[in-house]
Image (cartoon, helix red, strand yellow):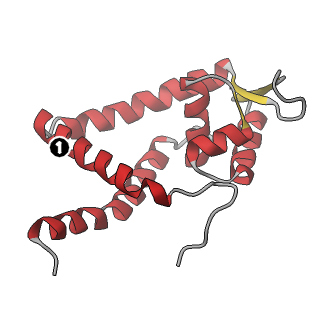
Amino acid sequence: MMTDKARTLHDLLQMVRPLHRRVARSVGGHLEGTGIGVGERAVLALLVEGTPLSVPAIGRALFLPRQNIQKWVDGLRAAGLAERWPNPAHRRSHLIAATPQGRELFAAIRKREDAAIAALAERLSPAELEAASTVLSACLEHFSPFEDDPDHPRPLA
């Protein structure tokens, strides 16, 4: 039998999937007119906010198969938003970097997203945000043993 605390946590976990779907749709809405989709946005974010990465490294960072990443990288490159650089550590696996156009587009996208996030943040107290962060961090840590290698995913039962 579940305790009240466990039931509350269960109910919170049940909200994760619909929340993820809604956030993805919101992100997609902020991408209208940019010519890129949610997957390409995720790749571009890594490239703009970090250093150039290989396709396998992007896949590991996003916990997604390399094949998906390659498709999105190809789209970003075709749009002039990303480019290949030589990889000193690996002759055949190039590094992918954001172009100045990619950085400019991502800054505009983030500006739209930040406005939407700020509107939600206004509705929440600092204590509520801290509590949410604590709960989500604990859930991520608790379920971390179930993380997959994106190139070798285990089937879901």
Q: Kindly tell me whether residue 125 is visible in this rendering.
A: no
Outermost front residue: 145
Which one is nearer the viewer's eye here, 113 or 1?
A: 1
- Position of 143 with respect to 34 (left or right) is left
Q: How far from the left and from the top, in percent, is residue 10?
A: 24, 68
- Position of 83 with respect to 5 (left or right) is right
Disc 1 marks a residue whose amino acid type is Ala
Residue of label 1: 131
Secondary-structure class at tag 1 = helix
Q: Is residue 134 above or below residue 65?
A: above
- Position of 107 with respect to 98 (left or right) is left
The quarter of the rendered structure image containing the N terminus is bottom left
Q: Is residue 88 above or below residue 72?
A: above
The residue under the point 40% across, 56% down is: 20
Q: Is residue 25 above or below residue 61?
A: below
The residue under the point 53% across, 25% down is: 49
The residue under the point 23% across, 43% down is: 134
Disc 1 crowd, CA 10 A, few/some/many (<14, 14-19, 20+): few
Q: How far from the left and from the top, in percent, is residue 30?
A: 45, 41
> Can you tell which quarter of the image residue 123 is in?
top left
> Can you tell which quarter of the image residue 100 is in?
top right
Q: How far from the left and from the top, in percent, is residue 117?
A: 30, 37
Q: Kindly tell me whether residue 53 is visible in this rendering.
A: yes
Q: How far from the left and from the top, in percent, is residue 110?
A: 45, 30
